[in-house]
Amino acid sequence: MVGHTKPRTKADQDRIEFVKGLMGCLPCVLVGYLDSPCNYNHITESQKRLGHQFAYGVCDWHDLNHVCWPGLSTQEMIGRFGPSYGHGKKPFEEVFGDELLLSQTVDFAHQLFMEHPWNDFEMPRSIGADIRRHHIQLRGIA
């Protein structure tokens, strides 16, 4: 763990539960794979956590470069899911944008959930598409 953060507030806990139980890995959502189990990845700046509201979900592949699909090589994983942060910050950000942008996309996804709730790990494909479109607009690619 890098640094300590303040104790969690109710809003922090709600966001963490949303990401881990309802949204899953954001990079996976951005490449079209919905509902991947994830960890809550806090964003750091100068070796210090920014707080619980500055985070996003990330699976073992996108976080640690752990090939989690049996029979796939690292190159096949990259081809299907994009690069892992474990490959370096630059390749990861070239595909998914910087971590603050990812955190903003989680905020948008949480807003969509509040308007149109879904069950645990049953995000509708239309919501996933809305999240991808929003993220692309944030990146200024569209």
Image (cartoon, rainbow, N blue to C red):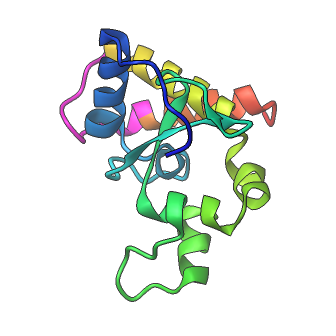
Tell me where residue 113 sits by quadrant.
Answer: top left
Vertical arrangement, residue 112 with respect to residue 83, above or below: above
Q: Main secondary structure of the magenta part?
A: loop
Residue projecting furthest to the front:
3
Residue in view at x 55 percent, y 36 percent: 3
Q: Position of residue 63 (x, y in %)?
A: 52, 58
Q: In the figure, 135 relative to 93: above or below? A: above
Q: Nearer the viewer, residue 20 or 3?
A: 3
Does residue 22 appear in this view?
A: yes
Can residue 115 be seen here? The reply is: no
- Where residue 126 appears, as percent x and y from the top left, is 41, 33
Above or below 138: residue 71: below
Determine if the magenta segment contains residue 118: yes
Report the front residue among 82 and 88: 88
Q: Residue reaching furthest left?
A: 119
**How many numbered badges does the structure rendering display?**
0
Q: Residue at x 35, y 18 (%)?
A: 8
In the picture, which quadrant includes the C terminus? top right
User: What residue range appears in magenta?
Assistant: 115-127
Which residue is at the front of the view, 104 or 7?
A: 7
In the image, what residue occupies the spot 45% across and 84% down? 72
Q: Position of residue 11 (x, y in %)?
A: 36, 11
The reply to whether the magenta stretch includes residue 55 is: no
Could you tell whether 142 is left or right of 104 in the image?
Answer: right
Residue 53, horizontal then vertical, whole percent: 50, 21
Q: Residue at (37%, 22%) from the top-left corner?
A: 15
